[in-house]
Amino acid sequence: MPPQNLLPATVAASDNAPMVLQAVVRGAKGSQAMIAGQTLRVGDTVADARVLAIYAHSVLIERQGQRQLLRLAEPVMQPSR
């Protein structure tokens, strides 16, 4: 999980609040996504959104009949080349 000072200010998941993807964890038991401080799998819900798919850097949700793709924020530090 990112340090607290790097988390977005809007992590609440009420009906109208923006959803923020905080992390994606891929493991032997499948993928999990952290949204609004909750660890979720495909089919789980948070607030009024249902997780449809979890990708390496994004999560597809359905909220109020609309599909949204939540993406991880760009890294604060870029790898050197």
Image (cartoon, rainbow, N blue to C red):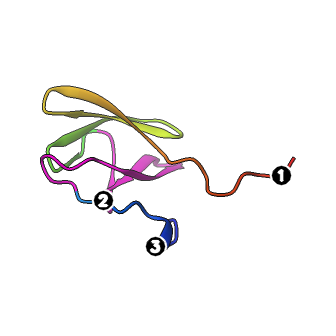
The residue where tag 1 is placed is 80
Q: Earlier along the polypeptide chain: callout 2 or callout 1?
A: 2
Q: Is residue 35 magenta?
A: yes
Q: Percent from the top left, x then y, of residue 16?
A: 15, 46
Q: Does residue 26 appear left or right of residue 9 in this picture? A: right
- Whether pointer 2 and pointer 1 mark residues with C-beta atoms closer than 8 Å, the reply is no
Q: Percent from the top left, x then y, of residue 13?
A: 21, 54
Disc 3 residue type (three-letter) = Gln
Q: Is residue 62 magenta?
A: no
Residue 4 is marked as 3
**Is residue 20 or residue 28 the one in the foreground?**
20
Q: Percent from the top left, x then y, of residue 44?
A: 24, 45
Is residue 63 shown above or below 76? above
Read off the magenta span: 13-42
- Whether pointer 2 and pointer 3 mark residues with C-beta atoms closer than 8 Å, the reply is no
The residue where tag 2 is placed is 11
Q: CA distance from mark 2 to mark 1?
A: 30 Å
Is residue 10 shown above or below 61? below
Q: Earlier along the polypeptide chain: callout 3 or callout 1?
A: 3
